[in-house]
Structure formats: C-alpha cells, structure tokens
Image (tube, rainbow, N blue to C red):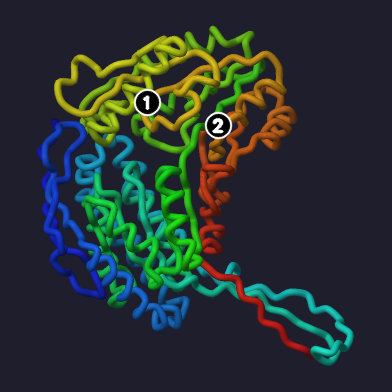
Amino acid sequence: MASKVTKDEKQLLIGGRWVDAGDGTYDVINPATEEVVGQAPNASVADAEAAAAAAREAFPAWAATPVEDRLALLKKAAAAIRARNDELVPLVIAETGATASVGSRMQVPVSSDRFDRYSRDIRHVQEKMLPPITSNATPLAPGGLISAFAYRQPVGVVAAIASYNFPLTNMAGKVAPALAMGNTVVIKPAPQDPLSVIELARILEEVGFPPGVVNLVCSQGPEPASVLTSTPDVDMVSFTGSTQVGQRIAAAGAPTMKRLLMELGGKGAAVVFEDADLKAAITAIGSTWAFHSGQICTAPTRAVVHRSIFDQVVEGLTAFAGRLTVGDPTEASTVVGPVISGAQQQRILDYIESGRQQGEVVVGGKRPEHMERGYYVEPTLITGSNDMTSAREEIFGPVVVAIPFDDDDEGIAIANDSEFGLYDYVFSGDTPRAFRVAKLLRAGHVGINTAQRNMDAPFGGFKMSGIGRDGGDYGLEAYSELQSIIWSS
C-alpha cells in the first residue's frame, strides 16, 4: 500500500474569506482502510445562508465582467489544477477509494479538461440573430420589419451540489460552465469525500476569481444543503445524486421557482442482440464492475440478452468477473476497489441477497474474504427477470443483472420497463437495426456497440433520471436564461 494520505481542513470560503465552519469539523474516512483521511469543515445553516448571500452580492459585477476576462480565469484554473495533479490524485484516491487507474485518468485530469473546455469563446452560444419577419399594424404597435435577437443571460446564483463518486470531476462540470456564463456559485461537495473539492475552491480563489464569485459550503449533515435549495438568494440548483434527493430539491425550490439541472439515478440496459460482437458487449457490461466498482449512474447494470446467446453472455461475464483483481486501490494491478462507505456496502449486499431469493447469483455475491478491512463487494452477476428488486432499483455498486428476451419488441420493452432513463446501450452487428432500436429506447443517451462517451453531446435523463442537459455547449445553455430582444425597422 502507498504511503498514508492525510489532509485536515476546517474552513469554508465565503465572500472571499476563509472562515471556520460554524459546526466544527468531522472525519473523512478512507473506504479502503476504514482509517481517517482527515478533517473536513462542518458548516452550519448560518454558514450556508452567508455563502448564498455573498454569491448574490457578487453576481452583478461578475455578470458584467467581460467574457474574455471570465474565460481567461477559467484557463488559469485549468492550468493550476493540472499543475497540482500529483498532489490531488493521491488525495482523491484516499477519500473516494478510486483505483489508481481511475483516480489518475478520470478524476483529476478530466477536471482540468472541463475548465479548459469552457474557457473557449462562448458567444456562439450566447448570441443568435433571428431572421426578421414582416408584421402588420395592430392595436398594440405599428407594422414593420420586426427583428429579433436571442440572448442568453446568466441565471444568477447557482448552488452546485455534487456526487461522491467523482467529486472533483463532477464539480468541475458544474462550476466551469456556470462561471463562464457569468453566474456566481456556491459549491457543496458530497459529505463523504469533500477534501479534493475544497482544494478546487482554493485553486479558484488563488487564480483570481473575485470575492464571492466562488463560495464553498461543506457539511456532514443535510441541513446546510437544504438551505441552498430553498433560499431566495439561490436562483438555480445543479445536483447530481439520487432520485429521492432530487425530488426533495425540486419540492424545496418550487416556491422560489428555482431553475434545476439534475442528473439522477440510472439503471442502464444493455440490449444484446444475437448478431452482436459478444466480446465487445461483455467488455462494456463488465465495466459496471471494472469502472469505479459500479459507482457510476451510466453503468450498463442490466444485461438484456437475446435468449439464443444468453448462456454464452452469462459464461463470458462470469469469466470476466473472475479475471478482475479486487484489492488495494493504490496498487496498479487493482481493478475493483471499495465502495464509498460501510452503509453503502451493506445496502449493496442486501440487494444481492434479494437477488439470491428472486433469481440466481451466478458469480460473486459477498464481501471478498481476502480483504480484512475496507468496504469491498465482489463483482456480482445475478440472472432472472426484470421484476426482481435488483433489476428495478439503482444499486450503485458492482452488480449486474442479466435478463433474457426472445425478440426485438420484447428486448425493447424490457429495456424501457424502468422508472429510470439515463443511459442505455445496443449491441448488434446490424447498424440500421441498432439505430432503429436506439431511437425506441426511452433514455437520454444510447451507446451503440460502445460504452464510450462524446463529452460534447447533450447528457441527461428521461423519466426519473433527471431534468435538463449538460455537456459541451449544452452545459452553457443549462446555466443561462434565454432572453429575446425585439426591434422594429
């Protein structure tokens, strides 16, 4: 195991000042060792209110800052994150339990890439001339040639509430486009692993973002975050997390008509047809185990497989799981690390037990015996029907459920028979068939013969998987209000 990483923090960033958290500090636990990584500041409700008020006060000046000046600061932030990569990666691995591969490739570098992405000129998104129309005179106004200009203004104050699986990457994906568009932000990291996000706030202050433009609230309990979802000082909530919490945020923000961007739960279906490249399909489905221990909402957690090849796919997945090294995330050979907490570990094991009762656990299904400490769960494959609890609810762990189907219509019906609709997949050697099926799936994103993403494509969910879209220019649109400016000539 690599040398122990420790980091103690006790202060929040509010209005350009680092201040002690109102409710002291709390322990951040390393999921791999169950040891304390460090102390994190525990904000009070008053701290959250002060942060939102500071962001509100800073908003007019930041919104009026020339676009090129805002984007230059984003460029500086990207470089500063990249320069601290060697310091941030071990911290992220320690507090999240991410493997060395995921931590070094997907956690820190992607964060700097996102600030780089949104440091580009945004005027092609912000400004759009519309064709003029001829209008007859009305009791309201004289006739004439009426021109129009669509202009995107910043929403205002954005509360950015991030998930625990990719704390730095997820927060960067919220903060960078929000700041580019002229919004001010209150950053609220997940309680389980806030330390790297605190470092992000420090970097943003150091590169020169004005006081109050970026504020940080960190807490172990939900009360400060609840304040951010209800206070009139916040105009928009950008949230990534569970559907249940998203529902509460929507209800809390309704009285003040908060704008919402919410990426919520997923139960991705990988529809595998009889003509599919089985190796490609098995590798993609196996990423549920191999990529951050299944703690990713886009994972293909339901393998919906044509009956003629079902046994082959189950055998392939079983063999795939057996080749995955479960262990210390700091070791280069480890593929499957721990899940985030003891509570989440037990929750996953409970889902597996329900799968054992309702279907069959083909491989895995328990805590790995060779890991004496840490919140580990074996890569697990369950076979059965789409009615099983483990097939209906988001588990957020290294668990795949395999379900057979007999024809195209049944496969599509099973895939769509879910309250979620975030990310589905189609595997077929017949490209027109794959595209036809993709368009029939009720999901915001569909991968055809790949689990790869295009980061400029719109990303978000149907049904209970969320509201709105981010990614590429769509992320800029998400953090803006569309204004029409009309004149007569």
Residue at horizontal 42 percent and vertical 16 percent from the top:
355
**Is residue 123 shown left or right of residue 54?**
right
- Can you give x and y, in whole percent of width and height, for residue 374 in the image? 19, 28
Q: In the displayed image of the protein, which residue is found farthest to the right?
A: 136
Q: Which mark is residue 450?
A: 2
Q: Name which residue type carries label 1.
A: Pro
The image position of residue 362, as x and y in percent, is: 41, 9
Residue hosting label 1: 398
Residue 132 sits in which quadrant? bottom right
Q: Which label belongs to residue 172?
A: none
Return the residue nearer the eye: 341 or 312.
341
Position of residue 348 in the picture relative to residue 409 (left or right): left
Return the residue nearer the eye: 471 or 185: 185
Residue 284 seen in this snapshot: no
Separation of residues labelled 1 and 2 (CA atoms)? 19 Å
Looking at the image, is mark 1 or mark 2 earlier in the sequence? Answer: 1
Amino acid identity at mark 2:
Thr
Which residue appears at 28% of the width and 28% of the height?
345
Position above or below: 279 against 440: above
Residue 155 rendering spot, x and y as whole percentages:
49, 70
Residue 329 percent across, percent down from the top left = 23, 31
For the N terminus, the image quarter is top left
Front residue of 202 and 3: 202
